[in-house]
Amino acid sequence: MKLRKSTLLITVAALAALATSIPLQAADAGRHEHKELSANSGGTLTLKAVVGAIEIKTHDQNVVTFDSVLKPGGTSKSTELIDQVEFDYQTDNGDVTINVRWKDDERPRNANLKCRHTLVIPAKYNIDVRTAGGSISGQDINGRVVAHTSGGGIRFGTVNGELKAHTSGGDIAFDDVNGDTDINTSGGNITLGKVGGDVIARTSGGNINLGAVTGNLKCSTSGGSITAELAKQIAKPLELNTSGGNISLAVPGDFKADLQASTSGGRVACELPLEGRIKPSSINGKVNGGGPEVTLHTSGGNIEVAKR
């Protein structure tokens, strides 16, 4: 009798364990989309996604490989929402277009999904990637880059081409950019290494840090400091503006400019030869005999023009 009782207990325990394992499997349930699309070097990848983070990698093949993993978000275990996502693919003369959209283009209520899109593109390729919710990241890109997200950070290595990046809620960071750059974030910091071109950078709530720039600068922030370096003499007007931080601009020793620098809550200093009206909180004068207009303004910090 004891043996039978023990056997019965083991059987019941095994059934209980099996029953508890079923919800765990359901919770891990998801969907994996995989596609390989022919491409040509120098072409363009266009990706539009209604949800999900995006990661870009490169390889030495004329193929775009796309993988997407979708899982229920939050505490939900239902996979019904996953089935509402559709994938459209198009190829045209080496260009690849991928559209990740809601079925019938109607966003479901409480559309909470975990989603990540990973793409591997040819070594020389342009990208235009946009997501309605998620971060965008990538390796070095030998081509033009357009990156847009409504909620996440943007982070890449070196971009050998023109760059346009926008996020409504995150940091933007690139190692180096060999081309003109236009970047905007509504709630984060902007960090760039060397830039071989003009830079337009705007943020509503963070700092701007730029390495050596060969072109012109136009930067503004509503809540942080601006640190920038010019690699050479500029030919057009330059403007740096912040409402709540310091401004530090490093320039070559022979840099020429018509400098207008002012602060409402700090001091202004210039290490280069300067003639004009010089006050503790403002400068209006010519640097090394004068040149393009350089306007620096902060409402709550110091301004420094330093020699590289």
Image: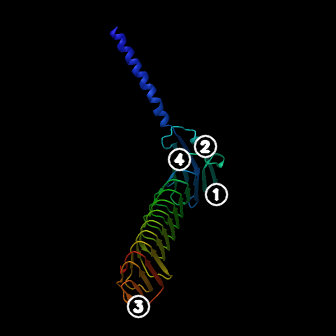
Q: Nearer the viewer, residue 238 or 204?
A: 204
- Regarding mark 1 in the picture, which secondary structure is present there? loop
Residue at the spot of label 1: 93
Disc 3 marks which amino acid? Arg
Tell me if residue 129 comes above or below residue 217 in the rendering: above
Image quarter hosting the C terminus: bottom left
Left of 87 or right of it: where is 230?
left
**Which label sits in the foreground, 3 or 1?**
3
Categorize mark 2 by other alpha carbons within 10 Å: few (<14), some (14-19), many (20+): some
The mark nearer the N terminus, 1 or 2, is 2
State how far apart marks 3 and 1 are (Cα).
60 Å
Residue type of the residue flagged with mark 2:
Gln
Dividing the picture into quarters, in which one does residue 281 lie?
A: bottom left
Sequence-first tag of 3 and 2: 2
Tell me, for residue 277, which label it has, or none: 3
At which x and y percent is residue 199?
A: 49, 72
Is 262 rendered above or below residue 179? Answer: below
